[in-house]
């Protein structure tokens, strides 16, 4: 502006003072025009140009450029990752109040920032172009979910809402849109009721498990007794069979050796009758053994 004022003042002065001043005035005017037509777009930004109220049909990338001064303006738009954090209030499938806190991040498409300004506006585009579609996706997805579908499953819910939101926004203006649900809150009365119900269900489950365990232990104990009884019966049978077999073999041995009976009776008979002298002729047993 000071250069422009100086140039304007130099023009009438040059009329009275000669052509040298005209050359100076022309130089200063050219310099002012050049300076005012310069623009620099910083890294991480893109620009859109308006000439006499008309939007240029392209966006301008970071760097240096020149435009017609005084009738043109260049506006920078931040195209780095943008962030929006908000809390949505809605109702789930059970018609209970629920609040979801989320973080939405995105990039603007650098080549179309002029379209963004012309169709939506540089300011408030998040409330005009993204939030309405995102709210619709939230309501549609959450309305189909129960408490159990949401509680502790925020990552799955975030993905489902994102998939629903994906076709709703303008991909020519926004890219790499990422949604993360960070916190969920249910109606306190409902949450307390669910907690009490969960506790009752847990107690019922524990009771059923204990009952089932007792039934299993009783069945196991009965099986053990059955196996033990069978083992005892087998043992008794085996012992009896062994005793019978032993007696049979002893009888056969005695039959083949009659002298053994005499010796045994000689050893054991006195003990039976109190140690008195036997009143039996052992030689007479020879005939009995032989029968």
Image (spheres, rainbow, N blue to C red):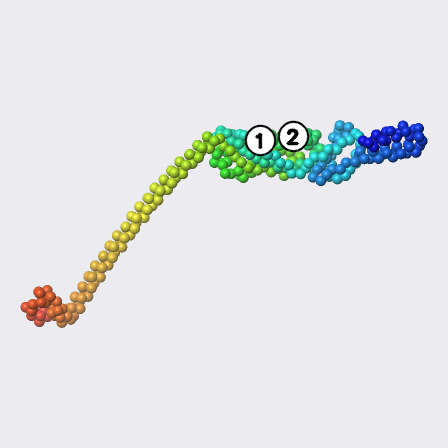
- From what the image shows, is residue 196 above or below residue 272? above
The image shows residue 123 at horizontal and vertical percentages of 67, 30
Give residue 135's mark. 1
Q: Residue at x 75, y 33 (%)?
A: 74
Tell whether 158 sits left or right of 175. left
Camera-side residue of 48 and 34: 34
Quarter where residue 256 is shown: bottom left
The crowding category of the residue bearing disc 2, from other C-alpha atoms within 10 Å (few below 14, some 14 to 19, many at least 20), is: few
Tell whether 119 sits left or right of 155. right
Camera-side residue of 281 and 6: 6
Residue occupied by mark 2: 124
Earlier in the chain: of badge 2 and badge 1, it is 2
The image shows residue 82 at horizontal and vertical percentages of 64, 36
Q: Residue at x 25, y 55 (%)?
A: 232
Mark 1: secondary structure: helix
Camera-side residue of 237 and 206: 206
The image shows residue 92 at horizontal and vertical percentages of 50, 31
């Amino acid at each position: 502006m000071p250069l422009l004022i100086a140039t304007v003042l130099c023009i009438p002065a040059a009329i009275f003072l000669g052509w040298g001043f005209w050359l100076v005035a022309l130089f200063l005017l050219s310099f002012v025009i050049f300076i005012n037509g310069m623009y620099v777009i910083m890294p991480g930004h893109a620009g859109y140009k308006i000439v006499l109220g008309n939007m240029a049909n392209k966006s301008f990338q970071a760097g240096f450029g020149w435009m017609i001064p005084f009738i043109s303006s260049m506006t920078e738009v931040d195209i780095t990752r943008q962030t929006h954090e908000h809390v949505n209030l809605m109702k789930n499938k059970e018609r209970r109040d629920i609040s979801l806190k989320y973080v939405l991040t995105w990039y603007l498409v650098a080549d179309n920032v002029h379209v963004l300004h012309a169709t939506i506006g540089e300011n408030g585009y998040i409330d005009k172009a993204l939030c309405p579609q995102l709210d619709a996706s939230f309501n549609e997805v959450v309305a189909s979910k129960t408490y159990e579908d949401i509680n502790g499953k925020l990552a799955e819910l975030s993905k489902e809402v994102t998939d629903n939101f994906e076709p709703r926004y303008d991909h020519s203006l926004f890219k790499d849109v990422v949604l993360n649900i960070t916190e969920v809150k249910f109606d306190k009365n409902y949450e307390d009721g669910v907690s009490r119900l969960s506790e009752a269900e847990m107690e019922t489950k524990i009771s059923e498990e204990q009952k089932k365990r007792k039934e299993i232990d009783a069945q196991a104990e009965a099986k053990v007794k059955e196996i033990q009884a069978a083992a005892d019966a087998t043992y008794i049978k085996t012992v009896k069979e062994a005793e019978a077999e032993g007696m049979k073999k002893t009888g056969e041995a005695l039959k083949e050796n009659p002298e053994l009976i005499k010796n045994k009776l000689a050893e054991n008979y006195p003990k039976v009758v109190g140690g008195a002298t036997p009143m039996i002729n052992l030689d007479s047993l020879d005939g009995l053994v032989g029968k």
